[in-house]
Image: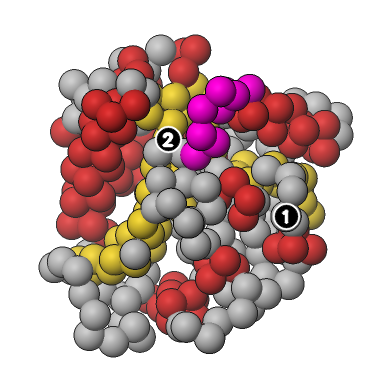
Amino acid sequence: MRRLQVFDDLESLSRVAADGLAAQIREAVAARGRCALGLTGGRTPRRMYELLAERHREAPWGRVDLFWGDERYVPHDHPQSNYRMVKVALLDRVPVPPANVHPMPTDHPEPSTAARGYEELLRGYFRGRPAAFDVLLLGLAANGHVASLFPHQPVLRERTRWVVAVDVPADPPRRLTITYPLINLAHQVAFLVAGSTKAEAVQRALRADSEVDEAPAAGVAPAPGDVTWWLDRQAAALVGPEKGGV
């Protein structure tokens, strides 16, 4: 099931998303003993991570395992690192055991080696239980890319590998990304999208006739779970009257 929730601005979106994510974490821990959380990078989720730390420091962080949906192939202390952004906004401010934090490795000479290593880590983590993130956070770029699944790229047709190295038309071009075979196992997927530059990408992603090559978000269709879109009004400007919250 797909749910749209539309808010006045990024601040109100981030507050509700932080509270919603905290509730999902608690539900997963109550139901399954742990929560496997897939994180997204970029600018939009930063405020949500900050509010999550401010409002929910008492969440059961000792039972939350953190993974990343994609990463720029830069050192972890680099300003463009998704890991670094999450560390500053969230990890440095909540009691997450270091053993529960699993950033994508970016120190191998060959990104493809790093991708294989991260896939092995994920497969090992899920061994003996369903291979599914309890919650997977995703963003959406103005050009339509999700994680580092860019329009018209060969990775959109990957059906076996969970993690791959890609070269994309962006800065920096070398990245690691999870793929649809893993994304679509998730129990819950939540998009966080804000800003007028994203409105056309949101419209393309939500159209019933969208092609994955043009709108990679259209390929996000987890069989076992729901997809929630947390949008500000600017990002939702072209999607019509359907709204889940204001």
Q: Magenta segment, which residues?
A: 124-132
Task: State the count of labels.
Answer: 2
- Taking the image as drawn, is residue 231 in sight? no
Question: Residue tagged by mark 1?
Answer: 159
**Residue at image point 28% right, 29% down:** 31
| Residue 203 at x, y percent in the picture | 43, 81
Element under disc 2: strand
Q: In which quarter of the image is the C terminus?
A: bottom left
Q: Which label is found at residue 37?
A: 2
Q: Would residue 34 be found to the left or right of residue 128 on screen?
A: left
Q: Which residue of the protein is positioned furthest toward the left in this rendering?
A: 246
| Residue type marked 1 | Arg
What whole-number distance in Å separates the C-alpha atoms at marks 1 and 2? 22 Å
> Main structural element of the magenta stretch: helix, strand or loop?
loop
Q: Position of residue 96 (x, y in %)?
A: 37, 18
Does residue 181 show up?
A: yes
Task: Residue type at mark 2: give it.
Answer: Leu
